[in-house]
Image (cartoon, rainbow, N blue to C red):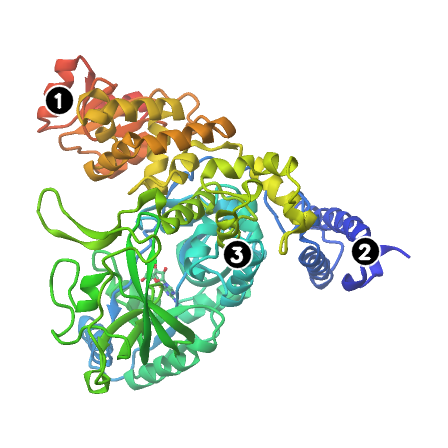
Amino acid sequence: MSTESVAVEDLTLEDAAAELERLAKEIARNDALYHGKDQPEISDADYDALKRRNDAIEARFPELIREDSPSRRVGAQPSNTFAPVVHSRPMLSLDNTFSQEDVRDFVASVYRFLGRLPDNSIAFTAEPKIDGLSMSIRYENGKLVTGATRGDGTTGENVTANIRTINEIPNELPRGVPSVVEVRGEVYMAKSDFMALNAQMEAEGKQTYVNPRNTAAGSLRQLDAKVTASRKLRFFAYAWGEMSEMPADTQMGMVETFKSWGFPVNPLMKRLSSVDDILAHYAEIGLERPDLDYDIDGVVYKVDSLELQQRLGFRSRSPRWATAHKFPAEQAFTIVENIDIQVGRTGALTPVARLTPITVGGVVVTNATLHNEDYIRGIGNSGERIREEEHDIRIGDTVIVQRAGDVIPQVLDVVMEKRPAEAEPYQFPKVCPVCGSHAVRERHEKTGKLDSVTRCTGGFICRAQATEELKHFVSRNAFDIEGLGSKQIDFFFENEDPALQIRTAPDIFTLEKRQASSLTKLENIDGFGKVSVGKLYAAINDRRSIALHRFIYALGIRHVGETTAKLLARSYGTYEAFAAAMKEAATLSGDAWNDLNAIEGIGEVVARAIVEFYKEPRNIEVIGRLLDEVRPQEAEQPVTAGSPVAGKTVVFTGSLEKFTREEAKARAESLGAKVAGSVSKKTDIVVAGPGAGSKLDKARELGVQTMDEDEWLALIGG
Ligand code: IVH
């Protein structure tokens, strides 16, 4: 019997592999017939059935997903950076309204602007505001040519390869559509897909994602479109950019057109005329919100008539004809059952309220961060009161918790009438609950202000700091070691057997060797097994060569996040150059120190933190052992073949006339130049506009090449 007719559940591994191969070929052949020659051989339904079967087999045997799998649907090779895309029409944002009063004002202002009496004669559309990422997708002659993020509204990022992997977005439009079509809308991840992804992450011992929106954003901004393809992203069309012809003259008509072209549109969109009806629809969407499979954070109202939209026009960044009516942050009452202290990687003691579980906006909340000692007492970060004096948070208190969009649940206030008589003010610990070292609040060197964070002084002897450091090291944006999650790290850290112990990062890479000569085998330990141990070693060995920015980020230097790590990698090129420069910068003066501070995006606090890190002998020792095992790669330079300024350090000073400072910087960087904030011996070019002062003087003094804006433009080719 051929595998073609075997139900997916009944396929053996071998059959499944053969079947995936057949489907890949068959689908590719039909794609070519459909797209290339406009001569499909099978019906759309049959084609969909092929794809569904492919998806079902891949879901059952993810290890068999082929390089050329139709589910990946990627044409282009991964690029190095996202090229900028200037939007043909700016992508605007929306004004927010928060109350019924605001909505009445909005509607009244529309009538007033148009010089009409408020007689309910103007229709509005009302639809959910999707909590995702806005995207502009351009089609020329019916073919998808560009997908771009919103960016700053004027210039976005070219994510075409990634957009093509989203099944809900057609790669091709039906015949007869206008020659230029730009469909805009929201890319998002369904809540159910998000939960499934997290369940999978957890099962693989990987770090879970925070929320669907960030996951969608992260998935979309992958340089490797295959990663995007492996995530299920979805789309709702609700707006447009350039259109060579308008297929409708109302908002509703446009959205219906998009639907007929194959785009998903939101089913809760309605056309309404009176404010009361609009508000009733808002309330209805609010009621449905917990049951929707996607996050929404409000309802968007738009004037339906495109002619009226045009007359109403725009304020600086938002249209006069639309507004977003936001949902209030959700609140609920619950009880603080306990206050725990968590010790983080940098030793910060963070109090966490353990709450009687309560549902807030469809999500069960059991914990809320209390930030720090001051927050518990009702004092904010700048020393201001955030709650009334006696409203300090105590164990046993009934509190109001709030959850808004992305943010971690907050304890807003205490219900004083419900405070138990025996409730005592919370005593913030004076010692680290994990290692017993003193916990202190540092004083700011310059301002003398007491830091709001209490820190454990135990450093490396503190088990919490050490394990958190390891967890950071293996985390997704650092070494990303599959199979080494939080649970596994705790296991290896606590283990007393030298052949099974991981106390510092280099130990991860010596584990396999130590195991080879040991009698206690990892594979015999509960929760591991032969296959997973093999996979773990493979995952570890896979990281013996690693991107420089990941390596730097993984070191866990205070204030050095991913972005800073990338800046450092790009500026220094190799780990050796970076480490040597940091050692040299130890005196907080001299060229190495100045160069570090001259990196645009690196301020003094960060610079100091890095230098301090390299002064600590223990760090040097651990990194030394790590470098015996791992080789950081040379930083990749952006693709800038033929760029006259690649690798050059450029400083812009004075006022620029042809472009903003940001544009100039982005342009230079896209051509492979490094843009610095101050002039040093390492500067190659200073571009000086009118009013340039000390930087230009310094450049001349140092003999650095200087030029004006036009000369710069001529150099980079306009
Ligand atoms: S209309 C000119 N409709 O909200 C108006 N935006 O705060 C263009 N958004 O950047 C936007 N759902 O990312 C519109 N149904 C919806 C929306 C929506 C979500 C986002 C969009 C926009 C942001 C503005």
- Does residue 466 lie above or below 111 as drawn? above
**Amino acid type, callout 2:** Thr
Callout 3: 10 Å neighbours few (<14), some, many (20+)? some
The residue where tag 2 is placed is: 12
Callout in the foreground (1, 3):
1
Q: Is residue 711 visible?
A: yes
Residue type at the position of mark 1: Leu
**Residue 306, horizontal then vertical, whole percent:** 34, 66
Residue at 50 percent across and 44 percent down: it is 480
Name which residue lies at 46% across and 39% down. Answer: 505
Q: In the figure, is residue 646 to the left or right of 400?
A: right
Q: Is residue 169 visible?
A: no
SS for tag 2? Answer: loop
Q: CA distance from mark 2 to mark 3?
A: 45 Å
Q: Earlier in the sequence, mark 1 or mark 3?
A: 3
Label 1 within 8 A of ligand 1 by Cβ: no
Q: Quadrant of the N terminus?
A: bottom right
Left or right: 248, with 644 as reference point: right
Name the residue carrying label 1.
696
Query: Which element is circle 3 on?
Result: loop
Q: Quadrant of the C terminus?
A: top left
Residue 575 location (% of width, % of height): 40, 26
Q: Earlier in the sequence, mark 2 or mark 1?
A: 2
Q: Position of residue 328 (x, y in %)?
A: 29, 75
Q: Amino acid at mark 3?
A: Val
In this rendering, which labeled residue sits more in front, label 2 or label 3?
2
What's the mark number on residue 177? 3
Instruction: Check contact, mark 2 vs mark 1: CB within 8 A.
Output: no
